[in-house]
Amino acid sequence: MNDAYGHLFGDRVLRVVAKMLQSSVKGRDLAARYGGEEFAVLLPATPIKGAVALADAIRDATQKLQFKRTDKDEMVEGITISIGVSIYRQNEPLLQFINRADEALYAAKRAGRNRIAAM
């Protein structure tokens, strides 16, 4: 995104996606920016099937977003998002859980992007 449209445009997209994630969670759930272009959504009371369903809804909503470029009279649409889903296993080290979610994210990207992978 940044390479094609510039960092300001990419940042605008990230801010919109962040707001969408915030509006997608409820109760004890938490959405946060985890790294440069990465977000984490923690769903402590949601089974993996529900987490995958939410991830797919987020992926679909992101793909439908439209942005008007400020430097040109042009609309940008079809924003893609890859999502890794993982469930915390009782008593596992937190880093192991995070690594598994990260592995799932990269599996989704390797599968062709704009996908969800669960581990």
Image (cartoon, rainbow, N blue to C red):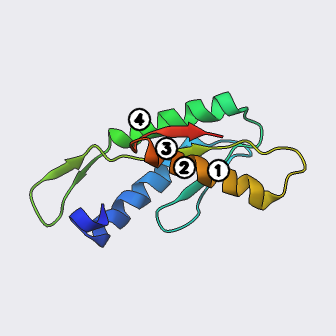
Circle 4: residue type: Asp
Amino acid type shown at disc 3 = Ala
Question: Residue beneath label 2, please?
Answer: 105
Q: Which mark is residue 108?
A: 3
Distance from Cα at disc 1 to Cα at disc 2: 6 Å
Q: For the residue labelled by badge 3, is the local secondary structure a helix, a strand or a loop? A: helix
Q: Earlier in the sequence, mark 4 or mark 3?
A: 4
Tags 1 and 2 in contact by the CB under 8 Å rule? yes
Pointer 1 residue: 101
Mark 1: which secondary structure? Answer: helix
The answer to whether 2 is drawn above or below residue 31 in the figure is: below
> Dot 4 corresponds to which residue?
60
Pick the quarter of the image with the C terminus: top right
Which numbered disc, 1 or 4, marks the residue that appears first in the sequence? 4
Q: Are marks 2 and 4 in contact (CB under 8 Å)?
A: no
Residue at (88, 45) in percent of width and height:
90
Of label 1 and label 3, which has the lower sequence position?
A: 1
Select label 4 or label 3 by which is in front.
3
Check whether the beta carbons of the residues at disc 2 and disc 3 lie within 8 A of each other.
Answer: yes
Report the Cα–Cα distance between label 2 and label 3: 5 Å
Q: In the figure, is residue 92 to the left or right of 111? A: right
Q: Is residue 64 toward the left or the right of residue 119 in the image?
A: left
